[in-house]
Amino acid sequence: MTEKLYWNDPYAKDFEANVVKVDGNKVVLDKTLFYPTGGGQPHDTGKIIHENNEYKVIDVYAENNEIVHVLDRNPSLNQNDKIKGEIDWDRRYRLMRLHTAIHLIDGVIEKNYGSGMLTGGQIYEDRARIDIDMQDLNKEKAEQIIEEANKVAEEGHEVNAIFMPRDEALKIERLARTETGRELIKNLENVRVVEIKGVDMQADGGTHVKNTKEIGKIRLSKFENKGKHNKRLEIVLENL
Ligand SMILES: [Zn+2]
C-alpha cells in the first residue's frame, strides 16, 4: 500500500521515497505526494529525480491500494532505489482551491436550497463544474448561489480532513452525495471526511486548502440547462 503523503500535508511540495516496483515507464513508490486521478480531482504532475536523471510524471492513478506514476520514458530505476519527487505546485494549488470551492458551493446549496440535488462535479486545471438536479434553477439563481458562496468563503472557514470509522460515517446523512459514493463508504474501514467548519461535510479523498479565504473570488463562467434534472454550473476563480 502506498502511503499518501498528500493527505498528511496537502501543502508539501517535495518528498523522498523508495522505489517498490518498476514496470516499463510505470513506477510504484512506498510513499508519494502525487495525487492520483479520482473523486473529480485530476492527478498531479511533476518530476521524479534519481542521481543525474530527471523524469517527468505525466499521469498518476490508483490501482489496488497502490499509486502508479507514469513517467515520460522508461527509467533506469530498481527496487529500493531512493528518489526525490517534486510536484507541480502551481497546478496542485489551483486544483485544491477549485476543489474546496466546489464543496463550499455544495454546502451553500444544501443549506439554502434543500438537499439531494447535487449529482456530480469535475475539476479541471482552470475551472470546475457542478451538476445539479434543481428544476427551477436558471442563470440568475445560479449567480445568486455563487454570490452567497463568495460571502461564506470570505468569512474564512477552516477546512479539515478527519477519519472516522465506517459505522459512524454511515450514520451521518448526506456524507456521500452520490449512490456510488455511498457504496464506496460501505467497503471502507475508515472513512476520510473533509469538513468546511459550519458549512459542509463530505466523504472525500481529495486535497483541499486549509481556509476558505484561500479560494478567492468565485465567478460563474457558464450556466447550462441540460434538461429538467440536469443543470450545470461552471465556475472559475479570480487569480487562478
Ligand atoms: Zn470532493
Image (cartoon, rainbow, N blue to C red):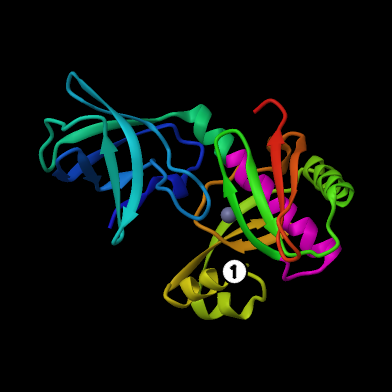
* Corner quadrant of residue 220: top right
The magenta segment is 96-117
Q: Answer with left or right where residue 177 lies relative to residue 222.
A: left
| Residue 236 locus on image (x, y percent) | 69, 36
Q: 68 above or below 71?
A: below
- The residue lying at 40 percent from left, 47 percent from top is 36
Quadrant position of the C terminus in the picture: top right
For the image, the number of numbered tags is 1
Instruction: Pick whichever, 218 or 228, lies toward us.
Output: 228
- Between 11 and 179, which is closer to the camera in this rendering? 179
The one nearer the camera, 214 or 112, is 112
Query: In the image, is 62 to the left or to the right of 169?
Result: left
In which quadrant of the rendered image does the N terminus lie? Answer: bottom left
Percent x, y of residue 196: 69, 54
> Vertically, is 146 above or below 191?
above
Residue 122, percent from left and from top: 58, 49
> Is residue 15 within the magenta segment?
no
| Amino acid on which the number 1 mark rests in the picture | Thr
Can you see residue 79?
yes
The residue labelled by disc 1 is 178
